[in-house]
Amino acid sequence: MFARSNSSSLVARGRYVLAVLFLIAVSGLPAFAGPFEDSVAKFANDSFSDTQEAVGEIATSGDPRAFAIINALQDERLYADPGSKKVFIKGTDDKITDVLTGTAVAEMPSTADGVRLNNRLRGVVEAALGGLNLLATDLDTRIGAAQSVFKAPDEALLPVVEGALKKETNSTAKRALAEAKAAIVLSKADASDADKIDAINVIRARGDQEALALLSNLPPDQPPTIARTITAAIGSINNTLALWSVAQNAWYGLSLGSVLLLAAIGLAITFGVMGVINMAHGEMVMIGAYVTFVVQELIRTSYPALFDYSLLIAVPLAFLVAGLIGVVIERTIIRFLYGRPLETLLATWGLSLIIQQAVRTVFGPTNREVGNPSWMSGAFDVGQMTITYNRLWIVVFTIAVFFILQAMLRFTSLGLEMRAVTQNRRMAASMGIPTSRVDALTFGLGSGIAGIAGVALSQIDNVSPNLGQSYIVDSFMVVVFGGVGNLWGTLIGALSLGMANKFLEPVAGAVLAKIAILVLIILFIQKRPRGLFALKGRAIEA
């Protein structure tokens, strides 16, 4: 027991000495260390005390080689030759480098040995690395070091954190250092009540789960004033997190709604204009995803520099391929089944099975890898919300597709003809509109939009022959709920179902949430059979 206590006291003393050296370095006072070369040479003495001195002197030297040396020491990749006093770093690739000259060495001298560490030195080295990172020139490194100190506060690093805080000019890094200092102050048993209250307020302003965990894990035997401050801070953080949780669920709902809108918008067009229940619509989505896979495979093998543009290339190709397949389906199958909804449903359902099996035969039954371009990778935080770039770009893409389609329906001759056929097919035919051609182009347009939906969905879902089946039921619910053939109704319906689903999931679970939404839609359709926004027209109203 005495040995363990003595060892702990030595570690604390070593960290304290190192902290003092850091404080001297950051405050601009002259350090006690000699030249950098002399400090490095101490590693060759094979003495724990000399190694500790070397670590302290190198860490406070300001030399750009300091981090690499101490990091190699921590990883047991630092070697020293007692005869020549030369020190070497063995890289992770077994490359050997002279520390002082930076030149590569063919082989390690036979008399060189690894610099030894004991438990006391490991604590000193860890503190040195933390201090070096706090004083690093790279902003992200400084912020990361401050956050590491916040998560594992060490009283010995308080002088280092305070010194770095005085020198810091970046507001983000300054806030991270202030939070690290607050965490250290709260871990000190001898800190004053005023300092602890100030620290609690800093942690309260941070307002995330880590701040809540830190305050919740403080010892319960606090003075009354501090205990009340901690309780108030915990309550405030809980309220803040509850609000951010609502915002996060709203974002998830918007993201899911945009996915449903992409999958359903083509179905809304074909269902509204032609009255066709197309059970193969999901397979058009799946075809668009596989077009993306093929494009990326060609780019990977032949033009790897173009990978970041793969989705931009895949979007028009997916639209053309799925659209042409849709026109072929309408001309060869659908045109003979108008006015017979049950036969149309069965025919398109059988067709969906054929397309799935054809894709399995060509590409195999397993999932295919579709990569994210660099501009769709990663995430960023807004407050306590996390927003991924792929979901954000899908939302933007969905909005663009929606408004382009609206403009096409409003300002082009095909759009005018489609609206006319939707409202009154017989009258449109009597006015000279070729309804047969409009039907084919409409089916092709709806299928093409499903294809570009597949491009987007390939970034967030598995690309497999069953991809389309995951969205076909939800797509029909969106179309029926919003109003058949009404794009604005489809938009409102998709966003409403997406939001409802994400807010019900935490309460009822994923399966029960979907069942509850289905029941609510059935009850709603009983009251409003034509959906939220019913189209107007003599034929429709009849």
Image: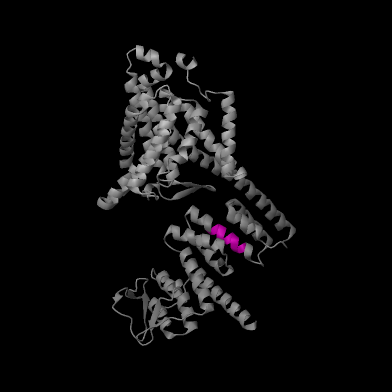
Q: Any magenta on residue 180?
A: yes
Pinpoint residue 164: horizontal percent, then vertical percent: 50, 62
Q: Which residues are magenta?
A: 177-185
Q: Tell me, yes or no, if residue 453 can be seen here.
A: no
In this view, 211 is above or below 256: below
- Residue at position x 64%, y 49% in the image: 238
Residue 432, magenta (yes or no): no
* Residue at the (50%, 38%) spot, across then down: 254
In the rendering, at what x and y percent does residue 496 appear? 53, 33
Along the line of sight, the residue nearer the viewer: 345 or 476: 345
Main secondary-structure element of the magenta-colored stretch: helix
The quarter of the picture where residue 511 lies is top right
Label total for image: 0
Q: Residue furthest right?
A: 224
Among the 4 quarters of the image, the one containing residue 89: bottom left
Q: Is residue 145 left or right of residue 300?
A: right
